[in-house]
Image: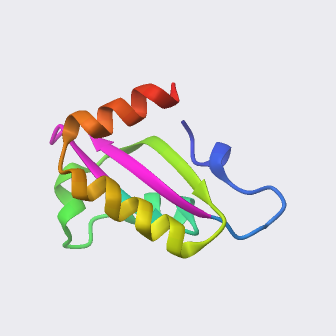
């Protein structure tokens, strides 16, 4: 899945819950944003943060929400599962 495939052509504001994968760490990262291209770029640039060790991060999954609160709640729910298999099931279900 490429970042350009996920951009909004009409410029509408939309929030995205996203799941990244680092093959290097064999770990997933869950977040939300209203600018996915910028966030992916930030995750893949060294800056002294948690995600530095996992570069390169790949987009594996995206959900779209019209409201920030709904995206925040969904991100929190996914993270609260603390389950790699839960995340992998989400990704498989989207394929």
Q: Main secondary structure of the magenta part?
A: strand
**Relative depth, front residue between 86 and 31:** 86
Residue 13 located within the stretch drawn in magenta: no
Across and down, in percent, residue 34 comes to 58, 69
Across and down, in percent, residue 4 comes to 65, 47
**Relative depth, front residue between 79 and 39:** 79
Across and down, in percent, residue 47 comes to 26, 72
Query: Would residue 30 be found to the left or right of residue 38 on screen?
Result: left
Where is residue 91, by image quadrant? Answer: top left
Give me the residue at 36% from left, 47% from top.
20
- Could you tell me if residue 79 is visible in this image? yes
Give me the residue at 46% from left, 28% from top.
93
Which quadrant: the N terminus?
Answer: top right
Query: Would residue 35 be found to the left or right of residue 89 on screen?
Result: right
Residue 25 located within the stretch drawn in magenta: yes
Residue 29, placed above or below residue 73: above
**Relative depth, front residue between 5 and 80:** 80
Give me the residue at 79% from left, 66% from top.
11
Residue 48, placed above or below residue 76: below
Picture colour scheme: rainbow
Where is residue 66, by image quadrant? Answer: bottom right
Give me the residue at 20% from left, 39% from top.
84
- Could you tell me if residue 23 is visible in this image? no
Across and down, in percent, residue 57 comes to 34, 47
> For the magenta stretch, what is the residue range?
15-29
Residue 70, placed above or below residue 86: below
């Amino acid at each position: 899945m490429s970042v350009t495939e996920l951009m909004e052509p009409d410029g509408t504001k939309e929030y995205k819950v996203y799941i990244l994968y680092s093959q290097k760490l064999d770990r997933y990262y869950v977040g939300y944003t209203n600018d996915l291209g910028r966030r992916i770029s930030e995750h893949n640039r060294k800056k002294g943060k948690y995600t530095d060790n996992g570069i390169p991060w790949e987009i594996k999954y995206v959900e779209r929400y019209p409201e920030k609160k709904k995206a925040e709640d969904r991100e929190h729910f996914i993270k609260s599962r603390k389950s790699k298999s839960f995340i992998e099931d989400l990704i498989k279900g989207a394929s």
